């Protein structure tokens, strides 16, 4: 069974705590204005991986296509998606950075898209690092407090780290130029 993703999918998350929509064979809902997200998804521990960078990267191509309901549906959903993601984050929903794009490895683009949507650089970086680790149960408590408040290395945790010449929260473009990458305690990308 195929499922659709759209602004209504995120709204469904906000109203019910469940992501996704009914099968694509059912009729599409009309465009919905951007509301505040209810606290229900956050209370249930729901996480949202919006893939904003992928959705937004297709906008110019879709705008150049012939007019029609499919074009209107995509543009309506894709352009509303950033505000919906920001509303979900504001309501306390765990936001995770991820893409299903090619070439793979463009999580830095997603982190920048999350920041452009309204998350702070700290929140956007968390979505691709310590918040994701915590959500997956790898590192449930950061070194300075509960999930989402710190980030960093924890004694006894796997030594996974990406090292930068400066704090990437001051310039998310730095994510494209790590100085070193350490995975499970082993240097996998040496300093330049």
Image (spheres, helix red, strand yellow):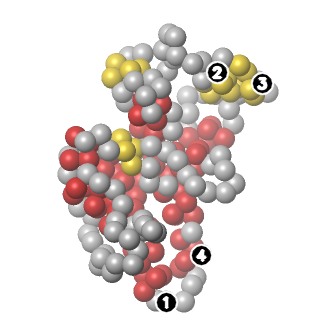
Q: Identify the residue at image location x=53%, y=79%.
A: 63
Q: Which mark is residue 67?
A: 1
CB within 8 Å, label 3 to label 1:
no
How much space separates mark 3 and mark 1, taking CA atoms?
50 Å
Q: Identify the residue at image location x=20%, y=47%.
A: 40
Say whether disc 3 or disc 1 marks the residue closer to the N-terminus: 1
Residue 47, percent from left and from top = 37, 44
CB within 8 Å, label 2 to label 1:
no
How much space separates mark 2 and mark 3, taking CA atoms?
15 Å
Q: Identify the residue at image location x=69%, y=36%.
A: 177
For disc 4, the marked residue is 61
For disc 3, the marked residue is 190
Question: Callout 2: helix, strand or loop?
Answer: loop
CB within 8 Å, label 1 to label 4:
no
Say whether disc 2 or disc 1 marks the residue closer to the N-terminus: 1
> Residue 116: in sight, yes or no?
no
Q: Residues within 10 Å of mark 3 (few under 14, many from 20)?
A: few
Q: Is residue 144 shown above or below 15?
A: above
Say whether disc 2 or disc 3 marks the residue closer to the N-terminus: 2
Say whether disc 4 or disc 3 marks the residue closer to the N-terminus: 4
């Amino acid at each position: 069974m195929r499922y659709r993703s759209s602004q209504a999918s995120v709204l469904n998350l906000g109203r019910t705590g469940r992501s996704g929509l009914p099968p694509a064979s059912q009729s599409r809902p009309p465009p919905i204005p951007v509301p505040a997200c209810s606290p229900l998804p956050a209370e249930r521990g729901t996480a949202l991986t919006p893939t904003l960078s992928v959705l937004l990267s297709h906008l110019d191509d879709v705008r150049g296509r012939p007019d029609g309901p499919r074009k209107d549906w995509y543009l309506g959903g894709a352009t509303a998606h950033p505000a919906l993601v920001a509303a979900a984050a504001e309501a306390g929903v765990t936001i995770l950075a991820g893409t299903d794009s090619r070439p793979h490895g463009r999580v830095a683009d997603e982190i920048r898209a999350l920041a452009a949507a309204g998350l702070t650089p700290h929140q956007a970086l968390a979505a691709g690092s310590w918040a994701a680790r915590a959500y997956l149960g790898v590192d449930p408590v950061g070194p300075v407090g509960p999930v989402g408040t710190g980030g960093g290395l924890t004694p006894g945790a796997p030594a996974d780290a990406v090292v930068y010449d400066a704090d990437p929260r001051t310039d998310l473009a730095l994510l494209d130029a790590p100085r070193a990458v350490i995975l499970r305690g082993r240097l996998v990308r040496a300093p330049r």
